[in-house]
Image: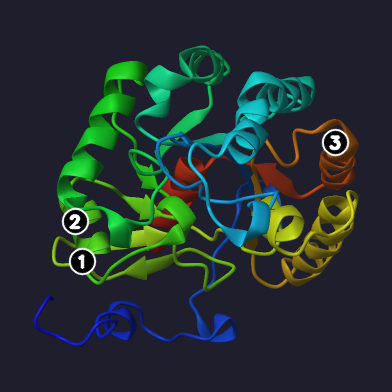
Amino acid sequence: MTSRETGSSVRERVSYEPIHRRRPLKLPFDARVAVWTIVNVENWSPLAAMPRAVLPPPMGQPLLPDVPNWSWHEYGMRVGFWRFLETLQARSLKATFAVNGSACSVYREACTAAREAGWEFMGHGFVQRPMHRVEDQAAAIADTMKAISDFTGRKPRGWESPGLTETDETIDLLAEAGIEYVADWVLDEQPVPIRTRAGDVISVPYTVEVNDVVISAVQQQPSDEIFRRGRDQFDRLYQDGAKAPRVMAISIHPYLTGVPHRIKYLEMLYDHILAHPGVVMWTGEQILDWYRGQAA
């Protein structure tokens, strides 16, 4: 891939297929929507610039260590994560746990709680750094999978790159490492096969819309936006799902939606969704297995 123009592989990997012209899919119990929650847990090293910032640096000059912005994230792991755990357990829901491989040791108690709650572990890079900035992607992928496998007893089947970043080679390396589905390709409302040199990897529909990084950190929307946007997203997918089933992702981070002024709006969103018949609340690997069964 290195000798080719950057980005040239992307269109080659996914066939263009409008949703109304596909072979029909069917969820169990005549459900219309499969909803999956992704809880993102990341290791932000205080030795480097923070992946995101809530406070700009004084006089516009980045400083290290960046204590206020590192602390903003660390709060999520000390407090916000535990609100997520309580919210999901109160509704008998299981999340897909997108975790940096290094976080399995840095935040061992939180990862243990996720494991004991029966959450699915999904690879999310070894540390929180764009794949374009990783010197050896294959090694980072292998290290992440080993850390998760050692911690949970099973290899992760799914992968979400930090910041959803991929180079032309990333998806091939993920397939060769045994990853079966990815969340990086946010291009559909149903699973989509992605061609790689090691066979197809399935794109399970993720979201950059009902995603608190976008809502709260980038767009800086009001605290209730995750409920308003999530409700409207679900309602339309539920309507369209009467014709063809859809997948809805809810992507959350402990330092954003786990804060006191936002958590009740996440709870309200779940309660709105759960009030509807014809919905399955699944993990990423459950959606993958369902799609593969349908495709077969």
**Separation of marks 2 and 3 at Cα, in angstroms:** 37 Å
- In percent of width and height, residue 104 lies at 40, 22
| Position above or below: 139 against 1 | above
**Labelled pair 1, 2 in contact (Cβ < 8 Å):** yes
Select label 3 or label 1 by which is in front. 1
Q: Is disc 1 placed on a helix, strand or loop?
A: loop
Q: Position of residue 238 (x, y in %)?
A: 78, 62
Quarter holding residue 196: bottom left
Which quarter of the figure has residue 211?
A: bottom right
Which amino acid, by three-letter code, is at mark 1?
Glu
Q: Mark number for residue 273? A: none
Residue that appears at 35% across and 44% down: 125
- The residue wearing badge 1 is 169
The scheme the figure's colours follow is rainbow
The image quadrant where one finds the N terminus is bottom left
User: Disc 2 designates what residue?
Assistant: 173
